[in-house]
Amino acid sequence: MLGQIRIAEYGLKDVMRKSIMFVLLLLAAALPIVAQTAPLDPRAEIEAFNRRFEDATRRMDNAAVVALRPVF
């Protein structure tokens, strides 16, 4: 009954527009999560990180070491 009152009060077009906007916002929020994929070869990614880390520590470049933090 409450749903019928809201539809009568706001009109069907307003309720549909708000519902569509809500669904679109949910999809827009979920898109970056879905777009993230696992690396094709995790071992290669780890080895590349280790090479960059070793290089930065050999040069004693603290800024480069801090920049290596993982991006989630």
Image (cartoon, rainbow, N blue to C red):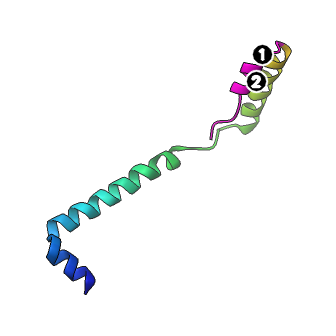
In the picture, residue 54 is in which quadrant?
Answer: top right
In the picture, residue 7 is in which quadrant?
Answer: bottom left
Taking the spot 74% from the left edge, 31% from the top edge, the residue there is: 44
Q: Picture coordinates of residue 40 (x, y %)? A: 65, 38
Q: Nearer the viewer, residue 1 or 36?
A: 1
Crowding at mark 2 (Cα within 10 Å: few <14, some 14-19, many 20+):
some
Taking the spot 62% from the left edge, 41% from the top edge, the residue there is: 72
Cα–Cα gap, marks 1 and 2: 6 Å
Q: Picture coordinates of residue 58 (x, y %)? A: 85, 15
Residue placed under numbered mark 1 in the picture: 61
Q: Picture coordinates of residue 53 (x, y %)? A: 79, 24
Q: Nearer the viewer, residue 45 or 67?
A: 67
Q: Picture coordinates of residue 26 (x, y %)? A: 40, 56
Question: In the picture shown, does residue 6 fall above or below 24?
Answer: below
Which region of the structure is painted magenta? 59-72
Using residue 60 as the reference point, say whether residue 72 is left or right of it: left
Residue placed under numbered mark 2 in the picture: 65
| Amino acid type for the residue under numbered disc 1 | Asp
